[in-house]
């Protein structure tokens, strides 16, 4: 095989065979195919797209480029959840203990945040003592014992994707649906998932800005999953404003605790119940969505879900007393209100831009090496469509510096107030299975 022949084939609209895709991915991973040829291929794919077979073959070639986690020592169907981007997305923190509390095994590999999107591991590490440095046996043992464990992403998972994603980032080829879909699916499959629930976000804070694009990405991932023997379903959810009210690591842990207690924001609670119901049905723990939802609601009401969160935190070295005393979580020195400059109705809360404001406070990483401040962030007080009076607090900044004019300005830029009432966007915009 010569790489140039594969590039011209794709450039001219041809279909690559499984063997050709395997050779390409292997050659790129081991360095025999250089970045400049892979860049040309990514651009050819960007313009020509990929057939369903090509997408599935690319996904599995990337899965086999590195370690594949074997979760077979854990009984039951291992269902993983993935959200595509999003700001202040606290769902994993809520969902993992919630579904585990009714018997769905959760063996979760998670990442750290970069830029304005937070990572589940960073959030969990705001619980004093909590750590994710478990070896594989400990990880499996904890899931078997408690039904739930979270571990950091193995460095040897899907190296082909790691390399290709880095290349796409600097060659204008990130926004290709087959490349995004195979990238995400390869990581889920290599992490050992038997079944996958996808939460594809639409809107300002997400990769996909329109519902049409989001639906196409979702359909593409569902098709890949089902072709390679992993039952996959996707829901489409709104990211035209941040989910919940909290953006920032410890602040989101507190919001997750409130939600597990049944006092969480409506949108976060609804999304967790929806995603959780799908996970429960795919795991075979409930027969129908409705039955699953009732089980999850009962687990919140009885305190079982919150109990499971405590067990999980303690098992990984965390101080579970934060659940009953959230003041033990890292707390910022200053809490500063941002007041509405005018009366009216909230018309927009640009999620990405609010995420950037939180990052400016130190909640997110500018580079992979940045230290983050777990205590800082932003609590919003409004949702799209709500009325607001001049001088009323629309957000509270949690900061470790007294001078926060830059962050306040960023929040003013993010939140638009108009004279006219606008209807709040629907949280759930569809489902693909
Ligand atoms: N997230 C990924 O993991 N890969 C992509 O290509 C895009 C988003
Ligand atoms: Ca949130």
Image: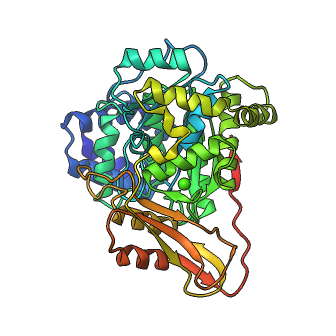
Query: Residue 106, position in %: x, y?
Result: 54, 27
The number of numbered discs placed on residues in the rendered structure image is: 0
Query: Residue 238, position in %: x, y?
Result: 62, 59
Query: Residue 101, position in %: x, y?
Result: 64, 27
> In the image shown, does 158 or 121 lie closer to the viewer?
121
One can see residue 226 in this view: no
> In the image shown, does 35 or 135 lie closer to the viewer?
135
Query: Residue 289, position in %: x, y?
Result: 77, 35
Q: Quadrant of residue 388?
A: bottom right
Q: Residue at x 39, y 14 (%)?
A: 137
Q: Quadrant of the C terminus?
A: top right
> In the image shown, does 416 or 47 lie closer to the viewer?
416
In-image side of 32 versus 115 (left or right): left
Q: Is residue 113 above or below residue 227?
A: below
In-image side of 242 versus 430 (left or right): left
Q: Residue at x 25, y 35 (%)?
A: 29
Q: Quadrant of the N terminus?
A: top left
One can see residue 402 in this view: yes
Q: Residue at x 21, y 33 (%)?
A: 30
In-image side of 150 versus 236 (left or right): left
Q: Is residue 195 above or below residue 412?
A: above
């Amino acid at each position: 095989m010569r790489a140039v022949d594969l590039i011209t084939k794709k450039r001219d609209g041809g279909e690559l065979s499984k063997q050709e895709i395997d050779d390409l991915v292997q050659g790129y991973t081991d360095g025999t195919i250089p970045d400049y040829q892979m860049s040309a291929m990514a651009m050819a794919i960007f313009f020509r797209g990929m057939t369903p077979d090509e997408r599935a073959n690319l996904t599995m070639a990337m899965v086999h480029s590195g370690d594949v986690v074997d979760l077979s020592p854990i009984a039951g169907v291992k269902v993983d959840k993935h959200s595509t981007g999003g700001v202040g997305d606290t769902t994993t923190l809520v969902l993992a203990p919630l579904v585990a509390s009714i018997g769905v095994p959760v063996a979760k590999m998670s990442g750290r945040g970069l830029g304005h999107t937070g990572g589940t591991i960073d959030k969990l590490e705001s619980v004093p003592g909590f750590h994710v440095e478990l070896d594989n046996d400990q990880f499996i043992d904890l899931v078997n014992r408690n039904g739930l464990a979270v571990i950091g992403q193995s460095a040897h998972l899907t190296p082909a994707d790691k390399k290709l994603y880095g290349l796409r980032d600097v060659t204008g080829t990130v926004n290709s649906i087959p490349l995004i879909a195979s990238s995400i699916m390869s990581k889920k499959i290599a992490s050992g998932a038997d079944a996958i629930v996808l939460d594809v976000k639409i809107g300002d804070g997400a990769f996909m800005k329109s519902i049409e694009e989001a639906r196409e990405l979702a359909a593409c991932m569902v098709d890949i999953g089902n072709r390679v023997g992993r039952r996959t379903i996707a829901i489409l959810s709104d990211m035209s404003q941040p989910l919940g009210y909290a953006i920032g690591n410890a602040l989101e842990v507190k919001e997750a605790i409130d939600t597990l207690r049944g006092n969480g924001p409506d949108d976060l609670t609804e999304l967790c119940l929806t995603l959780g119901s799908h996970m429960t049905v795919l795991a075979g723990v409930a027969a129908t969505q409705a039955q699953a939802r009732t089980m999850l609601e009962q687990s919140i009401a009885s305190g079982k879900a919150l109990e499971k969160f405590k067990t999980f935190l303690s098992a990984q070295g965390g101080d579970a007393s934060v659940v009953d005393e959230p003041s033990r979580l890292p707390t910022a020195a200053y809490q500063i209100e941002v007041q509405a400059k005018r009366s009216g109705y909230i018309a927009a809360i640009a999620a990405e831009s609010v995420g950037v404001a939180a990052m400016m406070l130190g909640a997110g990483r500018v580079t992979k090496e940045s230290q983050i401040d777990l205590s800082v962030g932003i609590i919003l007080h409004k949702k799209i469509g709500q009325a607001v009076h001049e001088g009323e607090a629309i957000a509270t900044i949690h900061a470790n510096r007294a001078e926060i004019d830059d962050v306040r300005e960023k929040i003013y830029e993010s939140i638009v107030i108009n004279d006219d009432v606008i209807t709040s966007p629907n949280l759930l915009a569809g489902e693909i299975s």
